[in-house]
Image (tube, helix red, strand yellow):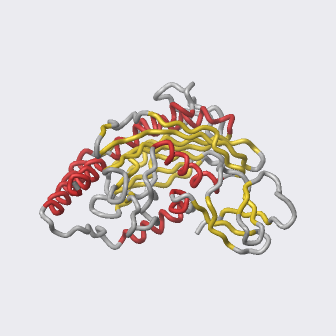
Amino acid sequence: MKKVALAGFFLVLVALGVAYNRAHHSASSSVGAAAAPGRSGARGQAGAAGATGMSWVTMRDTREKAFSIQVPQGWKTYGGLFRFSTIDARMIVDMTSPDGLTNLRVGDSTVPPYRVPGPFLPPGPGVAAYAAGNVFATKYGQARFAPMCQGLQLTKSDAMAPKYHPARGGMTRTGGGEAFFRCTKNGAPMSAYVYAETTLMGPGGPGSSWLVVALGSSIAPAEQATAAGAMLQHSGDSLVMNPAWIDMQNQLNNQAIQQINASTQATIAATNAAVAHQQAMISALQNDSFNDVINGVQETVDTTTGQRYIVPLGKGGKQWVYGNNGVVESGLSPGAGFDPLTPVSR
């Protein structure tokens, strides 16, 4: 059973690049349903302004030449393929408009594969209970967008049949979902969106593994949400995986499967010393305590005393603490003696 699950894990990873492309097609369709596929351009100048007149440039992965993708010209762009081990290669393309208000993201290399916790494996980095597509989209959106705006609120979260991977059944199954959010930035309304697909290998309890196989997200001023969706779609549709890289990764995956099936080394070492540096770069990119969020907690600080607290993740409202007597979520102060808590990054 274990060998089958591990083999499935490797095979799912092979399809990640294609899934990211298709996931962004999904995300853009949901955020900007009025935008036609393949359109490119802008309604405004600095922000996510529509599809007409936008100039695009091609960005190429320089680490392993794994893919190319179009990004808006003049936008701050970060990304590439980050390799954490022989079988764990993660992609991200992060794009921010010149005015800093709109952000589009293809994939996310900060999100690792997960193992399901058990009696001898507590929750922590890379260890979390399985999150179906809509659950993951909700938690991911909370982690990703909370530092980018104020008063983040989930407005809708729906489970759905996966669009880009077969749902399957039995020991390997995939679920899709999406989440919509609203918030404000400097008093202006913002809209945000996440689409995700997650695949579970195993029965779901201890000993099972799961990973995110499709992920697309965006945040923009509310009046530009449709335009942001069109641009997200254009960028996602332009993603092209390098066939030579796919062949190379398939070979690495097959070698890893053969090693496990031959009862050789169970641990696959990181491919080179640059991994630690890449992880530091990724941490600098996404200043989110995602391991806490996926496990349902967050680190906060009492803005009056400076004391830090690990508290249950709320629903997006303001959180307050009364001494050490628990946390209350309320839009207004619950009363005298309650101090406001502000989320912070670890």
Residue 203 in the image: state x and y as whole percent.
33, 50
Residue 118 in the image: state x and y as whole percent.
39, 63
**Is 187 rendered above or below residue 272?**
above
Residue drawn at point x = 79 percent, y = 66 percent: 339
Query: Can residue 185 be seen at all in this image of the molecule?
Result: yes
Residue 123 in the image: state x and y as whole percent.
46, 65
Residue drawn at point x = 72 percent, y = 49 percent: 185
**Is 34 left or right of 93, judged from the image as shown?**
right
Looking at the rendering, which quadrant does residue 157 occupy? top right
Looking at the rendering, which quadrant does residue 335 occupy? bottom right
Looking at the rendering, which quadrant does residue 161 occupy? top left
Q: Which is nearer the eye, 51 or 4?
A: 4
Looking at the figure, which quarter contains the C terminus? bottom right
Residue drawn at point x = 41 percent, y = 62 percent: 117
**Is 66 rendered above or below residue 279?**
above
Looking at the figure, which quarter contains the N terminus? bottom left
Q: Which is nearer the eye, 145 or 264?
A: 264
**Is 187 left or right of 130, judged from the image as shown?**
right
